[in-house]
Image (cartoon, rainbow, N blue to C red):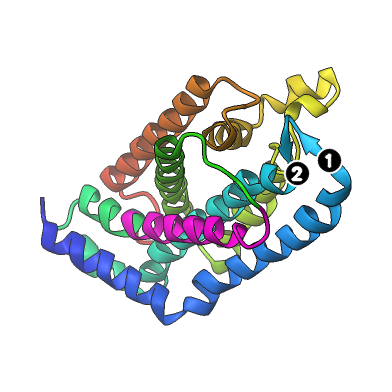
Amino acid sequence: MNWHAVRAIYRFEMARTFRTIGESILSPVLTTSLYFVVFGAAIGARMGEVGGVSYGAFIIPGLIMLSLLNESISNAAFGIYMPKWAGTIFELLSAPVGWVEAVLGYVGAAASKSVMLGLLILLTARFFVDYEIAHPLAMVLFLVLTAVSFSLFGFIIGLWATDFQKLQIIPLMVMTPLTFLGGAFYSIDMLPPVWQKIALFNPVVYLISGFRWSFFGQSDVDVVVSFAAIIGFLLLCLAVVRGIFLTGWRLKA
């Protein structure tokens, strides 16, 4: 294992984040704060409680997931796409750096940024609504696993993309709708029976449900199923990344 290469990639990616801290950290936190003002305060005051939890507190896990998924994908995709676009990826491919080191560096940095962002949003939520975390260790576990899994997914998108436009297709046209339809702002139990069954085909439902369970001890889906879904997605993404590096698909495009 070339730990020097891992540290170099990781430090470079983290330095890029702090050079653009307004776009990387402050902008998502500000956007989420507006969600809390509109949905938590204005609408939540008229919504009452959902499953015994105030609506403002109920949407916290969904809002964190909404930002976490998009930022994980975008950070990792942009991180690996830029060397492809600039042509510096040949330095990575010719160096004694394997796919494991590349993943640890790029994906590790993207996941670190996302976890930082998630914790900042959690801290920001305290200014708008009172909440308790029933299972703090499970909350951290779900947060880290989701960040790593979707950073890997973003890494795959960055390798697949051939232009900047494709970097935004999945986060904007796929992940955001799936998150809104995955119970970010409501419980699946509030849907008609038919739509409840349809919602179970949405993978984001399992992420938000498991994460919400760590806060309030209640979920739309069994927490074991949610955990298994995240682990399965993580392993699938790892297998895809390994296959890409072994075959060289899109690495030089």
Q: In whole angstroms, how far apart are the C-alphas of marks 1 and 2? A: 6 Å
Q: Position of residue 86 (x, y in %)?
A: 38, 76
Quadrant of the image occupied by residue 167: bottom right
In the displayed image of the protein, which residue is found farthest to the right? 46
For the residue pair 249 and 174, the one nearer the viewer reads as: 174
Judge whether 198 appears above or below 121 on screen: above
- On the question of residue 26 being in view, the answer is yes
Question: Given contact means CB atoms under 8 Å apart, are the residues at marks 1 and 2 in contact?
Answer: yes
The first of marks 1 and 2 along the sequence is: 1
Quadrant of the image occupied by residue 42: bottom right
For the residue pair 72 and 1, the one nearer the viewer reads as: 72
Please check the rendered image and state whether residue 247 is part of the magenta-colored stretch, yes or no: no
Q: Which residue is mark 1?
A: 48
Q: For the residue labelled by badge 1, is the local secondary structure a helix, a strand or a loop? A: loop
The magenta span reads 108-129
Horizontal arrangement in the rendering, residue 222 relative to residue 174 (left or right):
left
Q: Position of residue 128 (x, y in %)?
A: 67, 60
Q: For the residue labelled by badge 2, is the local secondary structure a helix, a strand or a loop? A: helix
Mark 1, other Cα within 10 Å: few <14 / some 14–19 / many ≥20: few
What's under tag 2, amino acid-wise?
Tyr
For the residue pair 39 and 14, the one nearer the viewer reads as: 39
Judge whether 51 appears above or below 113 on screen: above
Main SS, magenta residues:
helix
Q: Position of residue 118 (x, y in %)?
A: 50, 55
Residue drawn at point x = 12 percent, y = 63 percent: 4
In the displayed image of the protein, which residue is found farthest to the bottom? 19
What's under tag 1, amino acid-wise?
Gly
Residue drawn at point x = 54 percent, y = 75 percent: 23
